[in-house]
Amino acid sequence: RVAYVNGVYRPHGQAVVHVEDRGFQFADGVYEVWSVADGRLADFEGHMTRLFRSLGELRIDPPMSREALTRVLRETVRRNRVRDGIVYLQVTRGTARRDHPFPPPGTPPSVVVTAKSMNFDALEAKAAKGITVLTQPDNRWGRCDIKTVGLLPNVLAKQAALDAGAGDAWLVDEMGLITEGTSNNAWIVDKDGALRTRDIQANILRGITRQTLMEIVKEEGLTVDERPFSVEDAKQAREPFVTSASAFVLPVVGIDGAKIGDGKPGPLAKRLRDLYLDKTRDEAI
Ligand code: PMP
């Protein structure tokens, strides 16, 4: 495998950043993940637009133009011979002697790009079974709309879920309402059949898969109700599921040890997964 680090492609095992990189010292950086479908980048514009928004919100200078970044993403995919998989991009505020204030103007941001293959059939098998989730308190900071590399609460919640034998955690705010998963957005088809997901005014990441799926849902003549739902709503739901660039649309079949319905993925989640895959694979660049 090969990784891009600050202008150079290096063997993955030798791809390193400086000990005083602000990503390492302060989690002072942002990232994006694109799904790679048949060697092409899915939901390309959405992720690129969100990257530049994240950089802007943190006042990190874009390291290069969108066009130049696109070339690096594609070249990293090509050099790693990825057909199906993901490409990961991280930009930090750069390397400087450890000190909280921003480094001097002109300090170049650090850029890292990696790509890895994923077994598409294994992902499909996982989706056919569905996953279970464990609810956990959402104790993240107030700017979860920025895709920063500061993911410690997500990491701890995910591990707590795995330790409890679940597949992922769903985060719950102080009102008892679900915000999102540790690395995905949370959805339900509620007990009355309404398709619901948290609104983006809430403290969540504005998922690109969520955004594209909302367009698909509208094209199908269905509606999405951006109305918060509680843990209890989710347990009583017909079909909970999650969305992300790396998992697409993934059914949830159990919450906090309780089976949802018959414990099998529901029909709408399955259909939306197929529609999402069809559209994004078609439009990948
Ligand atoms: N929420 C969080 C906290 C995430 O980390 C992710 C994935 N990066 C998502 C939602 C899903 O976002 P997307 O559909 O853009 O991958």
Image (cartoon, helix red, strand yellow):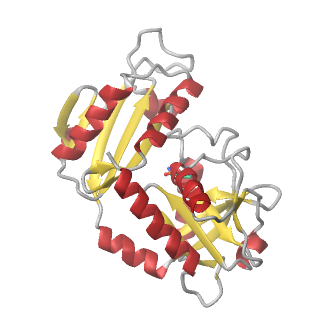
Pick out the residue farthest to the bottom: 262
197 vs 234: above or below: above
| Residue in view at x 33 percent, y 73 percent | 122
Judge by depth and name the residue closer to the eye, 270 or 165: 270
Residue 60 rendering spot, x and y as whole percentages: 50, 22
Residue 251 rendering spot, x and y as whole percentages: 54, 73
62 vs 132: above or below: above
Q: Is residue 4 left or right of residue 46?
A: left
Would you identify the image quadrant in which residue 54 lies? top right
201 vs 92: above or below: below
Judge by depth and name the residue closer to the eye, 79 or 285: 285
Q: Is residue 180 left or right of residue 36?
A: right
Judge by depth and name the residue closer to the eye, 135 or 264: 264
Residue 71 rendering spot, x and y as whole percentages: 26, 33
Residue 131 rendering spot, x and y as whole percentages: 52, 75
Pick out the residue farthest to the top: 105
Q: Is residue 240 left or right of residue 163?
A: right
Residue 138 visible in the shown view: yes
| Residue in view at x 58 percent, y 65 percent | 220
Residue 18 visible in the shown view: no
Would you identify the image quadrant in which residue 79 lies? top left
Quarter occupied by the C terminus: top left
| Residue in view at x 41 percent, y 13 percent | 107
